[in-house]
Amino acid sequence: MTPWEIHGSELTNCNCAYGCPCQFNALPTNGTCEAAICFHIDKGHHGDVALDGMNMAMVAKWPGPIHMGEGRMQLIIDDRASPEQRAAMEKILRGEDTEDMATVWWVFSMMSPHKEETLFKKFTFQADMQARTGAVHIEDVLDLEAQPIRNPVTGAPHSVRIDMTGGFGYEVAEMGSGTTRTHGVLDLPDNVDTYAQFNELHFNNRGMIRAAV
């Protein structure tokens, strides 16, 4: 197994209501799970291959809850990446060189037997976890915009987060409202003003690297 480690950030938008039942081991809001899941690597490596500054993403759809499987997914990798970087990020997103059940990427990949061809596209990623604002543009694939949840009476930004003491996705995630417009093979028509998640990434082959207490 090639050793790897990634430290960066995630911005995700799925078709569920704010809070996303998956975070609480409950069933999806509308029965299906459909998501644009985007990542920026501040610092990382796969073996001797540096991954600093790279972007990667996946678009995924499951006909029911994720754990029931039968998902379709497509990986998208920053077109600035070298052939070695492309191969490394594809392996990580497919859950390869990873202990079983150790990362969300392993789970998503195992629950998605229907895999589309990996794309290498022009990619911009911006996310401010504390402000709960962000935007991702992937040429010919998707545009994701996220903002704070708004108070329905005053319109003021609403601040809420999830602290997860277990699990394999994050320790703390800020909640937001997201909309994704897709242009590629997998369509996300219901991702309009739905659940958005901002969180830090810190993973290696064995899973999440948790902050020191």
Image (tube, grey):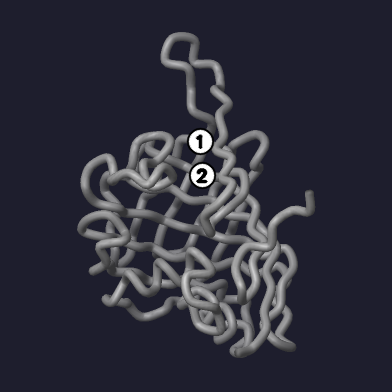
Residue most toward the right?
212
Q: Disc 2 marks which amino acid?
A: Gln
Residue most toward the top?
153
Number of numbered tags placed on the structure image: 2
Q: Disc 1 marks which amino acid?
A: Gly
Q: Residue at x 58, y 26 (%)?
A: 159
**Residue on which disc 2 sits:** 197
In this rendering, position of residue 98 left or right of residue 94: right
Q: Residue at x 62, y 61 (%)?
A: 40
Label 1 crowding class (10 Å Cα cut-off): few <14, some 14-19, many 20+?
Answer: many
Q: Tag 2, which secondary structure?
A: strand
Q: What distance separates the C-alpha of mark 2 from that of mark 1?
A: 6 Å
Q: Position of residue 9 (x, y in %)?
A: 63, 55
Above or below, 34 relative to 134: below
Look at the image and tell me in which quarter the N terminus lies. bottom right
Above or below, 125 relative to 131: below
**Residue on which disc 1 sits:** 176
Badges 2 and 1: C-beta atoms under 8 Å apart? yes
Report the front residue among 207 and 121: 207
Q: Residue at x 59, y 36 (%)?
A: 132
Q: Position of residue 87 (x, y in %)?
A: 55, 86
Q: Tag 1, which secondary structure?
A: strand
Above or below, 179 relative to 74: above
Q: Residue at x 38, y 38 (%)?
A: 194
Q: Position of residue 183 (x, y in %)?
A: 33, 60
Label 2 crowding class (10 Å Cα cut-off): few <14, some 14-19, many 20+?
Answer: many
Q: Position of residue 146 (x, y in %)?
A: 50, 40
Report the front residue among 40 and 63: 63
Mark nearer the N terminus (2 vs 1): 1
Above or below, 2 relative to 29: below
